[in-house]
Image (cartoon, rainbow, N blue to C red):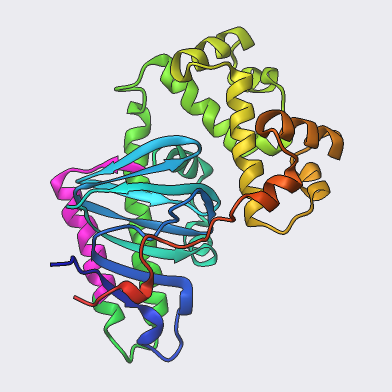
Amino acid sequence: MSRKISQTNISAYFSQPIRNDFHLYRFANTLLLPRVLRKYDKCLTGICMKGEVRFTLLGMKRVIKANEIFCFLPGHFVAIDSVSDDFEAHYGIISETFMKDITSRFPNVMFDYLIAHPSMSMTSMAMDEALRYFDLIELKIKEKYNLFQKDIIFNILYSYVLDMYNMINRDLPNLPLGKTANERIFDKFTLLAYHHIKENNPVTYYADALNITPKHLSKVVKIIKGISVKQWLDEFMMQELKQTLLSTQMSVQEISDEYNFSSADAFHHFFRKHTGMSPSNYRLQTDRPVDRPLITTEDLVIR
């Protein structure tokens, strides 16, 4: 017997709808994320009750497990790799605009933490508290004639994010626990690359930003990934370039400028070196990934 997913779309319930700003999923057996690596333009956050989901984020393989809270922020390249048969979660999908309104008061350190740690383990008490938010949102969604429904749901989500930030703030002093010094340096390096890859900076830029020598950074990346810093940065850059070619209508010259290449010829040379073909040929010869989740809303069944 197939598993069911309960979906509630706020826009179906009240006269001044949130429209596409929020969707709620209860007892979901997958996450509505791309199956191929694409830049995700929404926020997806929730709780994993059982099972696991394996995914790729920032070029790294990751996993969400039972009793973890998870959050995917807008603007990340992400793809689902696999979902266990027993996976079950409660989650919401929030539009980028609505999420910006909710998180406008939060410091950047929170989002940097979530980029590096998209899932966090929770105590049973914290799980119960988080579940109450989803119960309350569902209750408010089902109130068909509440003039302040959007504001109420906004404030519930704001409180949910406040509790998430409290968890992060509590854990920040203990962030080194369970990680080696090299892993902590690599996490910081990854965040820097995420924010600055388009600047096409040299290795020395990242070493200086981390207050270590280029030799030390090279040693760390070699230990963690088995390749040089330059190779890792090139692979990260290629991931960004390929996705930009496939998911936008930007011209080759525009992409060259966006990623700070000295010229379109330099971009061509870099891309051909790593793929054996020009950017234009790559765009023509590669099937463009369809931004389609593992299942669509038409597949969802109300429980």
Q: Looking at this view, is 15 or 9 the one in front?
A: 9
Q: Is residue 73 visible?
A: yes
Occupied quadrant, residue 282: top right
Magenta span includes 31: no
Residue 131: x %, y % from top left: 21, 60
Q: Which residues are magenta?
A: 119-138
Q: Main secondary structure of the magenta part?
A: helix
Q: Is residue 271 left or right of residue 50?
A: right
Residue drawn at 48 percent across, 61 percent down: 99
Q: Is residue 246 above or below residue 207?
A: below
Q: Position of residue 124 (x, y in %)?
A: 14, 47
> What residue is shown at x 52% (from left), y 9% (from top)?
219
For this orientation, the residue located farthest to the front is 285
Q: Nearer the viewer, residue 123 or 80?
A: 80
Residue 12: x, y in percent?
37, 86
Q: Quadrant of the N terminus?
A: bottom left
Indicate the quadrant where residue 18 lies: bottom left
User: Does residue 245 appear anywhere in the picture?
Assistant: no
